[in-house]
Amino acid sequence: MKSGQTPKRRNSVRALGLLAAVGALLLVCVLSIMIGAKPVPIGDVWHGLFHNSGVGNDVVIHDVRVPRTLLGLLVGLALGLAGAVMQGLTRNPLAEPGLLGVNAGAAAAVVSAIAFLGVTDVRDYVWFAFVGAAVVSVVVYVLGGSRSATPVRLALAGTAATAALYGFVNAVQLLNSAALDRLRFWTVGSLASADMETVGRVAPFILVGAVLALGIARPLNAMEMGEDSARALGVHINRTRVVAMLAVTLMCGAATAACGPIVFLGLMVPYMVRAITGPDMRWILPYAAVLAPVLLLGSDVLGRVVVRPAELQVGIVTALVGGPVFIRLVRRKRMAQL
Amino acid sequence: MTTKTLRTGGGVSVRYAPRAAFSGLGLILLTLAVGTVLVCTGDFPMTPGEVLDTLIGRGTVVQEFAVMELRLPRVLVAIFVGAALALGGAVFQSISRNPLGSPDVIGFGQGATVGALAVIVLFQGSAVATALGAVVGGVLTGAVIYLLAWKRGVHGYRLVLVGIGAAAMLTSVIHYLITKANLVDATRATVWMTGSLDGRDWTQFWPLLAVCCVLVPLVLGHGRALRMLEMGDDAAYALGVKVERTRIVLMASAVLLVAVATSAAGPIVFVSLSAPQLARRLTRAPGPNLAVSAVMGSALLLSADWIAGNAFGDRQLPVGVVTGILGGCYLLWLLVSERKAGRI
């Protein structure tokens, strides 16, 4: 931030930027409704959204594209916000739901449900994934040294937990090939099977989590200065921490449950946002909430286009795009002090 | 750590640590014992005497087949795979100065897996081609991670984090390949990914032996330099260690060892992670404990193979499942205890 700018001016620039981001989000939503196995011309989008006739492109829009776009919006919002909150809470630019074992926890719970409880309906995976994700995220956070977590320690605790859980997942899959056949499609992270029912199931969790996350921007700001300073400024450290973990667990668990593990989104987006807004969580959180869906839906649209007529799952696209960003972040010199 | 010096009349003296020496000896005996049990037991049980007779060529045809074609190669593969994985793990943990910086956490295992899976899924390749794919994948990944972590030298911490990023990307490629496969190939790929010693014979053993014969002495020979590197680059440099060259030689050897072991038995998890740590606790010696780690790896993998074959009734699980479960428990304990001690 240039020192010559007044705070007021800076804020108006940021607000304009946020507006532009919302514009980009709308554009991506329209693209996500238009592009796919059956391209829909832009004129039909409006018609399909508001005057559903039940035939032709209107059906495609109503039954396939709109649920998919909505789910992408929700999941993107959840992962972006969760990543930003986790990074703020742990003062660690590497904190990210996927790296912290949340995905592996969800996968382990889902595979157990399929193999041991005979669950077959994809829509029932949601609850199991949710519980698995919640348990593992808390365990990793505690193991990684909740108070004094260094980037390496947290990342390693998460990676180690992921390795152990995927060992278990592989073992169950080997003994039960039905589980393998079902799970191998869930594990990649895809929006393709979205329907309105799934959207309805996960939306409440994600929205509650989002409200909680946006509500703790100010205490998170204070905590970035260190716990003692935050306490001196009147922040309830433990309450903030509990609310933050609750928000993260609600959002990550629901997002992972709905469409499988999607890595790197929660890492990449707050990193980029920080470069735009500076360190103020009150701006980082809304920016992340808007830009993460832009990236997720963008990746999803990209995945629909690149290997036509097949689709590349959005989880794969985000990992392949996010990996290089992560490595670049690691190569930066002052990363550890962030 | 106490060391003693062994002097001979001719003026030659060797310095050694009694505790490390005894630990190594004990582990070798354990390995031999479990190996003997594994060769003797099975659908066609034999006494150790009969096995010995068979080994010197005086057994019946059936005995000869059971020992020479089925059991002995499997046990030998397990011993060398265990040693190679553990040695690779010891080197990487020492270089990254982090007890969790093992090759299967920082991407090399995933790289080998991508190579093998590509062969299985895209080309329906044979077992030999799969093994080659694993070696190529592992070595390529090692080179790429090293280059990406390079920035006026490679620091352990950056290496680990770059490796974790690469591991995540490679994992998504693995998932993608598995969704692309039909169910038969997907099952084959999952079996391979779990790591198994079933049906391993001399064709896996000879390449493994050749690589170990070259690389194990090379790595052990750099043990002193590695120990100095643990004190920091500057201190090591001042003590006359060629820092970056030592690191390249050791890392290349470790990557090759892990890749070849993976190509022989699949990515068996946690041996490279836990063997060096267990060895360190057994010898109570600082430094990488390379030799004892290698023997520990062999003992661990053989014991896990015995458990996999016997602990689950009639059901024989791949050895990777057992090491995974054992390793998971070990890991939890490691994280908790290291955290208390404030070392990671």
Image: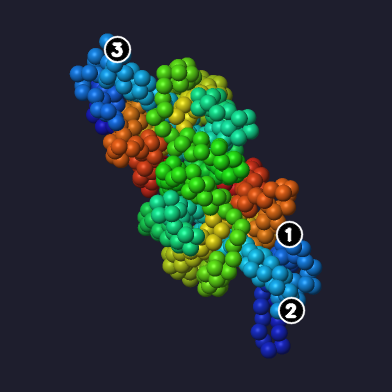
Q: Determine the residue located farthest toward the top in the rendered image.
A: A51
Residue A317's place in the image compared with B27, above or below, is above
Label located before the other in sequence (2 or 1): 1
Rendered residue at 48%/53% (across/down): B113
Q: Mark 2 and 1 residues: CB-CB less than 8 Å, in contact?
A: no
Residue A262 visible to an observer of this rendering? no
Distance from Cα at disc 2 to Cα at disc 3? 85 Å
Where residue B58 is drawn, which disc sits there?
A: 2
Give me the chain letter of mark 3: A
Q: Amino acid at mark 2?
A: Arg
Give me the chain letter of mark 2: B
Instruction: Give x and y (percent) for residue B223.
Output: 56, 68
Q: Quadrant of the N terminus of chain A?
A: top left
Q: Quadrant of residue B340?
A: top right
Category of crowding for the residue at label 1, using alpha-carbon neighbours closer than 10 angstroms: few (below 14), some (14–19), many (at least 20) = few
> Which residue lies under the disc numbered 3?
A52
Q: Determine the residue located farthest toward the front in the rendered image.
A: B61
Category of crowding for the residue at label 3, using alpha-carbon neighbours closer than 10 angstroms: few (below 14), some (14–19), many (at least 20) = some
Distance from Cα at disc 2 to Cα at disc 1? 21 Å
Where residue B204 is drawn, which disc sits there?
A: none
Give me the chain letter of mark 1: B
Where residue B43 is drawn, which disc sits there?
A: 1
Rendered residue at 43%/54% (across/down): B124
Q: Quadrant of the C terminus of chain A?
A: top left
**At numbered mark 3, what does the secondary structure look like: helix, strand or loop?**
loop
